[in-house]
Image (tube, grey):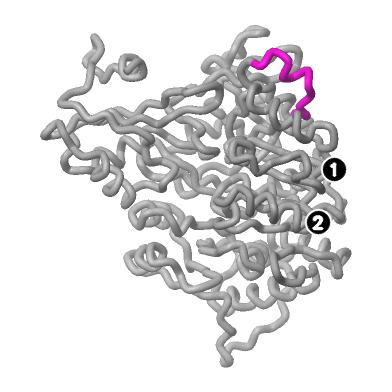
């Protein structure tokens, strides 16, 4: 729904939506009554009062460790309401990685919707960060005055920080402004025809960039959000059953999840009976695999292949897939066209590439982020002034994606650097290498990505060990303390030495052939 043109912050936007749709369902939970927008707004005010009572104000940052509970979502909205930046933590991360994330963003508080996980509690204690459990009743001695949005918050205030893998071993926190999210909400509403009668399936973890679509496209357009738990997402048949029970109309996930559901035969012609739009992105969807999905639901649902780096507010292009797109059965479908109010360049260094040639996709537009939080050194090379649009103050983001434009459509070619998309997550292979080198029995490591088929592959770690025969189970166990599960290599090849090229460097080309 359109909001008043003078609203430039997300707290004000949410309360405008909540007033208009007060008795509509905002959150749909299995086995419980729906939570209305009026009820959700009340919970947002309650938590916003607790945040203010804890001394938080505009410009602060808090880390959230929340499940997909009503209070968890309300905590995110409460942060936006009082002008506090939030970042969602993955409680399954090793303590070491949580420490690195918290050391970068330096939160004033860790807010939880239940008792903090052991990993989060350990990290909080190590860095002396207070925790606040929002499910608990407020202290009776604290007067919780009614809270409305903070009118001082502007479009340039930071709404959230989303952490991604970093090549130095330290994750990068992408800072996204209120204005960028507001533009995304409007674009998403128009592109996917989101209306208040829609029910969006919340299958993405809150710490994962794709969750931005679920949360903001639903709760800022008067639609309903149906969160799916980690247990439900892990069980193919249970997940599909929950989607149908909730009456979900819009689905967004990585292609891997859809392929898994088809492989497990959980998706049948009668499944997804209310779904009218299936959106997928975060990694390539091979045409051969995508054709199965189109065969199942193409006659009654629209299928969208989307693209967008975390640094550009989740998504900035969408292409509706047709039978013609998949006719050759080769490679990946087109990314389509970048959003209308964006501009972009395909560059070789700082020079535009000739028509039809591949170049690095560089984006300029209202969803480009503010940079990496508290990290100007890593922001400087990629958030830059456009070599063409020199009069534009807004930064250009160098995506690192090599793209070719054909007949106005963008086609993914490869990555420029040592970064991959694996299981929907953006992964720096260098970060995995840094973690493995911390194991005292490893003398050298090279991590490569080997494609199994279009769009899919395995992370393979080639390790030179001190005794040349380290048990793989030991390596996996040790890495669990350093890396999230999706970053632990699929295979380990342990040898006495690694092959080198003429320059004396590890020969990664040779490793890929092993």
Any part of residue 156 in sight? no
Question: Which residue: 82% across, 61% down?
Answer: 17
The residue closer to the viewer here, 76 or 279, is 279
Quarter holding the C terminus is top left
Q: Is residue 257 left or right of residue 375?
A: right
Residue shown at the point (11%, 34%) measured from the top left: 467
Q: Does the rendering let one see residue 414? A: yes
Q: Position of residue 341 (x, y in %)?
A: 77, 33
Answer with the quarter of the image where residue 267 lies: top right
- For disc 1, the marked residue is 193
Q: Residue at x 62, y 28 (%)?
A: 285
Q: Position of residue 240 (x, y in %)?
A: 68, 49
Query: Which residue is disc 2 drawn over?
Result: 223
In this view, the residue in front, 56 or 226, is 226
| Label 1 packing within 10 angstroms: few (<14), some (14-19), many (20+) | few
Q: Position of residue 5 (x, y in %)?
A: 86, 52
Disc 1 on helix, strand or loop? Answer: loop
Which segment did they paint magenta? 318-329
| Relative vertical location of residue 193 with respect to residue 390 in this rendering, above or below | below
Judging depth in this view, the residue of 311 and 431 nearest the camera is: 431
Under circle 2, the secondary element is loop
Image check: 27 left or right of 331?
right
The image's mark for residue 32 is none
Query: Quick check: 127 left or right of 414?
Result: left
| The magenta stretch spans residue 281 | no
Mark 1 / mark 2, whichever is N-terminal? 1
Q: Residue at x 22, y 30 (%)?
A: 494
**C-alpha distance separating marks 1 and 2:** 11 Å
């Amino acid at each position: 729904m359109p909001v008043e043109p003078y609203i430039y912050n997300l707290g004000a936007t949410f309360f405008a939506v909540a007033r208009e749709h007060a008795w509509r369902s905002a959150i749909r939970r299995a086995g419980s009554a729906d939570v209305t927008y009026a009820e959700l707004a009340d919970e947002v005010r309650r938590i916003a009062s607790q945040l203010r009572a804890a001394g938080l104000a505009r410009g602060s940052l808090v880390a959230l460790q929340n499940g997909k509970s009503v209070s968890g979502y309300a905590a995110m909205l409460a942060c936006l309401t009082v002008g506090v930046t939030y970042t969602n933590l993955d409680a399954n991360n090793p303590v070491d990685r949580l420490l690195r994330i918290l050391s970068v963003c330096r939160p004033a508080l860790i807010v939880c919707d239940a008792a903090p996980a052991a990993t989060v509690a350990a990290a909080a204690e190590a860095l002396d960060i207070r925790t606040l459990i929002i499910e608990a009743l407020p202290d009776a001695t604290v007067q919780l005055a009614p809270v409305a949005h903070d009118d001082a918050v502007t479009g340039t205030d930071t709404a959230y920080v989303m952490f991604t893998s970093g090549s130095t071993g330290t994750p990068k926190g992408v800072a996204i402004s209120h204005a960028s999210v507001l533009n995304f909400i409007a674009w998403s509403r128009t592109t996917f025809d989101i209306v208040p009668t829609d029910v969006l399936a919340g299958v993405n973890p809150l710490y994962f960039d794709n969750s931005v679509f679920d949360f903001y496209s639903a709760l800022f357009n008067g639609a309903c959000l149906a969160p799916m738990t980690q247990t439900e997402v892990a069980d193919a048949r249970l997940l599909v059953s929950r989607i149908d029970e909730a009456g979900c109309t819009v689905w967004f996930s990585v292609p891997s999840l859809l392929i898994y559901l088809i492989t497990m035969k959980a998706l049948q012609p009668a499944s997804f009976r209310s779904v009218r739009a299936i959106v997928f992105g975060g990694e390539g969807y091979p045409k051969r695999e995508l054709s199965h999905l189109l065969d199942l639901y193409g006659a009654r649902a629209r299928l969208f292949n989307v693209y967008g780096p975390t640094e550009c507010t989740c998504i900035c292009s969408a292409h509706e897939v047709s039978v013609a797109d998949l006719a050759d059965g080769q490679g990946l479908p087109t990314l389509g066209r970048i959003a209308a109010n964006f501009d972009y360049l395909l560059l070789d260094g700082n020079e535009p590439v000739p028509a039809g040639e591949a170049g690095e996709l560089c984006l300029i537009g209202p969803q480009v982020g503010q940079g990496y939080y508290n990290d100007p050194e890593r922001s400087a090379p990629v958030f830059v002034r456009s070599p063409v649009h020199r009069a534009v103050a807004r930064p250009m983001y160098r995506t690192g994606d090599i793209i070719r434009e054909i007949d106005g459509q963008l086609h993914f070619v490869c990555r420029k650097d040592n970064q991959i998309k694996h299981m929907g997550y953006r992964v720096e292979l260098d970060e995995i290498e840094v973690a493995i080198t911390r194991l005292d029995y490893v003398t050298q490591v090279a991590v490569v990505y080997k494609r199994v088929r279009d769009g899919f592959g395995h992370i393979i770690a080639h390790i030179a060990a001190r005794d040349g025969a380290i048990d793989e189970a030991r390596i996996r166990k040790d890495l669990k303390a350093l890396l999230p599960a999706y970053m632990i290599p699929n295979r380990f090849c342990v040898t006495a030495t690694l092959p080198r090229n003429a320059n004396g460097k590890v020969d990664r080309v040779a490793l890929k052939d092993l």
